[in-house]
Amino acid sequence: MARVLLAGESWISQATHFKGFDSFTSVTFHTGADNFIAAAAQEGIEVEQMFAHDVPAKFPRTVDAMAAYDVILLSDIGTNSFLLPPETWLEGKRSDNPLVSLAQWTRAGGGLMMAGGYLSFQGFQARANFVRSPIAEVLPVTMLEGDDRAEVPQGAACALTATGHPIAASWTGTAPDLLGYNIVQAKPEADVVATVNDDVLIATMAVAEGRSLVWTSDIGPHWCPDDFVHWEGFAPVVGAMLRWLGAGTSA
């Protein structure tokens, strides 16, 4: 069974409540990965989630440390969280660059996945900033320079485009519409498995001994709405993507 690490897809919110003359603040923690993790579990795959606030200090920074996993998924977390560990940000010390290591790990047989979101690819106001990162070379797509979000509140239709791909075999019936995604361009050597609004939704690519894959929408609401995550085809597609990625190391 593939060993899967999901980094990101969580956040902490601070709210101010005004009640007449008085006000107070509250802090809440949220994760957007529950539906994805449950879908993977339905397919017999266990996903370990590293919350976004833990990534700067705890994400594996070397190829040797990453060897504990077959698949690493980055979801809704930008480059700063990987490039600014506490020892660098707070103490001005040099540290290993995990994005360099992640590209090396992928070429050596790992399975790298990026899922869409406000802090994926380029993201909201281009703050994710992966376009010139080391992993840009090993992803199956090229990224825009600026804000790459497509907000589609009326719904964006999904379609299979590579029916012979192993992932396509898991697609059951007609998928519900998605409500947004990151706009990317497939590299010439990539396989576009599915589209959303005629843009890339799922693309895959062989990378030396490893593999990479993108899912350009979110893995939960709001871009990936409730009817999509409860679609009968969601769990099979999630399982197929993770198995395809893991085959680079288990084959």
Image (cartoon, grey):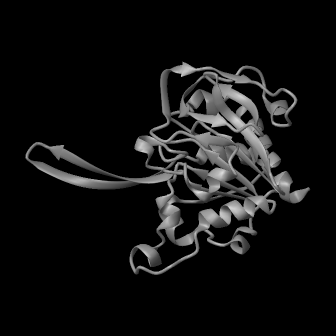
Q: Position of residue 207 (x, y in %)?
A: 78, 52
Q: Quadrant of residue 116?
A: top right
Give the residue drawn at x 81%, y 28%: 162
Quarter of the image that includes the C terminus: bottom right
Left or right of residue 160, residue 219 in this image: left
Q: Is residue 30 visible?
A: yes
Q: Is residue 156 above or below residue 235?
A: above
Q: Quadrant of residue 108?
A: bottom right
Give the residue drawn at x 81%, y 36%: 167
Outermost residue, right side? 251
Give the residue drawn at x 66%, y 41%: 141
Q: Position of residue 53 (x, y in %)?
A: 47, 62
Of 114 and 13, nearer the camera is 114
Give the residue drawn at x 45%, y 75%: 88
- Total count of labels: 0
Q: Is residue 101 above or below residue 212?
A: below
Q: Position of residue 224 (x, y in %)?
A: 57, 33
Q: Position of residue 243 (x, y in %)?
A: 81, 48
Outermost residue, left side? 21
Quarter of the image that includes the N terminus: bottom right
Q: Is residue 219 visible?
A: no
